[in-house]
Amino acid sequence: MDTFLKAINTGDLAQLLSCFSATSVITDAGRRIKGLQAITQWAEEEFLLPHGTLTATDSRPVCGLPGDTVVEARISSAHHNGRSRLLITAIGDTIAYLKVRADVSADDAPASRPGLGAGTSSSGRGRNGP
């Protein structure tokens, strides 16, 4: 997680990609991004080229789901400025799955992994920008 945050905040694409694998998946605003080429494009458009930042304000494991962590964050980018929640599923040091959910309230329950019930869809609402 520290490497991921540092890479985004310093604009280091190589370091960011080292956090993912060829089979990693990101869901962000209803989009499914899979593989390193698609993750590269997502990272450049969402964070790196617009000099975006991601500041973690809280981090906690998801009870009963080994490797899953919920990160409360403030995102500043070309597409979103404000609170967000990230659900990260790690396998070892690699992010296997990352779900970005923008404009969450403190009362919202953590999102679920795909196929596990509620919270698996993303409407993209609350995004600022195009």
Image: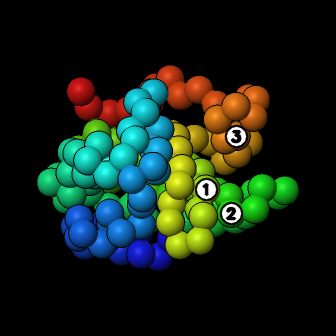
The circle on residue 89 is 1
Residue drawn at (26%, 47%), measured in percent from left and top? Answer: 37
Residue drawn at (82%, 58%), measured in percent from left and top? Answer: 63
- For mark 3, what is the residue? 112
Q: Nearer the viewer, mark 3 or mark 1?
A: 1
Up the image or down, 85 lies above or below 119; here it is below
Q: Position of residue 8 (x, y in %)?
A: 31, 65
When asked about the image quadrant of residue 3, the answer is: bottom left
85 relative position to 36: left or right: right
- For mark 2, what is the residue? 67
Q: Nearer the viewer, residue 100 or 40?
A: 40
How many C-alpha atoms fall within 10 Å of the one at disc 1: few (<14), some, or many (≥20)?
many
The residue most toward the right is: 64
Q: Position of residue 62 (x, y in %)?
A: 75, 57
Distance from Cα at disc 3 to Cα at disc 1: 10 Å
Up the image or down, 35 lies above or below 16; here it is above
Q: Disc 1 marks which amino acid?
A: Thr
How many C-alpha atoms fall within 10 Å of the one at disc 3: few (<14), some, or many (≥20)?
some
